[in-house]
Amino acid sequence: MSLNLTILGCHSATPRANAFPTSQYLVINNKHFLIDCGEGTQRQMRKYKVGFSKIDHIFISHLHGDHFYGLVGLLATYGILSREKELHVYGPKDIKEVTLLQLKISQSHAKYPIIFHELKSKESELIYEDDKVSVITIPLNHRVYTNGYLFTEKEKPKKLHIQNISNYKEIGKADYLNIKAGRDVVLSTGEIVPNSELTINPKKPISYAFCSDTSYKPNIIPIIQNVDLLYHEATFLADKEDLAKKTKHATSKQAAQIAKDAKVGQLIIGHYSGRYKDISLFQKEAKEIFENTELAEPGKIFKIE
């Protein structure tokens, strides 16, 4: 059970020489995901050695250019690389139309299957699940329909407490599946051996919440409660709270308040406005409210083991 998050881009609006719009590469429980795909994402993937072929699922938060203008280029590159396996793209309604139109007009031939999962619900919903990871949406409040995403490891089965089991000669290997499933054991004497004595609970599943562009929205707190790692946009410093409200973005202090109220393990802030030359000011402000705050920076890796 582990999590590895690589920041590919973390700035807002226009790309600059050393500032790239939003994109992240997430590996959780050995599953590989791309989150948002701003312009330049492919270059950043190459730079930070992200394996193109490992990604089968791409999650787009909303249809503003700094979050998805790199998508069609990436899909075209997959065609050049002769990709054959299917690729799943999750994003707002109309992402299929706008993407396929660009591929069609540019005659970029993607011979591999692209499966679009278009989202329109304003309520949190399960959109992906396998035997290792589940993903649910986090409805946000931006100028266009926007979702964040919560990635959670599937809980591992209980482990057998072999030392305790050995104290009971009647318990054999044939009982192990039932014990792992949480059942108590009834001995021939009628004594009940509680499952808690025979098993070791697995570690808490690791979770990561990605909250893209959004105004301050406290009602997401129940969805992201107690996550290990939270990324929350912080476009402005606190002195621009009026501008944040107008543009439906958040400040560093608002992001920190969300993290504090949700009791998350660690906060990452990003999506900095280009007006700021010193991004350390974002961390300084956020730490006044939530101490365990880190800055998103291209190439920075966050790990949870």
Image (cartoon, helix red, strand yellow):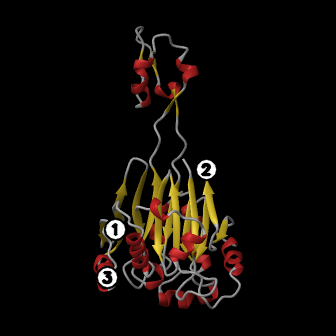
Residue at image coords 33%, 85%: 106
Q: Position of residue 244 (x, y in %)?
A: 53, 87
Task: Point out the tag, 2 or 1, that comes first from the N-terminus.
Answer: 1
Q: Give x and y (percent) for residue 67.
A: 46, 79
Q: Dot 2: what SS?
A: loop
Residue 223 in sight in this render: no
Lower sequence index among marks 3 and 1:
3
Left or right, residue 288 beside residue 181: right
Residues tagged 3 and 2 counted as in contact (Cβ below 8 A): no
* Residue at the image position 58 percent from the left and 20 percent from the top: 163
- Quadrant assignment, res 172: top left
Q: Nearer the viewer, mark 3 or mark 2?
A: 3
Q: Label 1 is placed on what type of residue?
A: Glu
Q: Which residue is disc 3 drawn over? A: 107
Callouts 3 and 1 close, C-beta under 8 Å: no
Comparing 51 with 12, the one in front is 51
For this rendering, which residue is in front, 180 or 240? 180
Q: Is residue 187 visible?
A: yes
Return the residue at label 1: 123
Residue identifier under label 2: 305
Q: Nearer the viewer, residue 109 or 124?
A: 109
Badge 3 amino acid: Gln
Q: Does dot 3 land on a helix, a strand or a loop?
A: loop
- Which callout, 3 or 1, points to the residue nearer the camera? 3
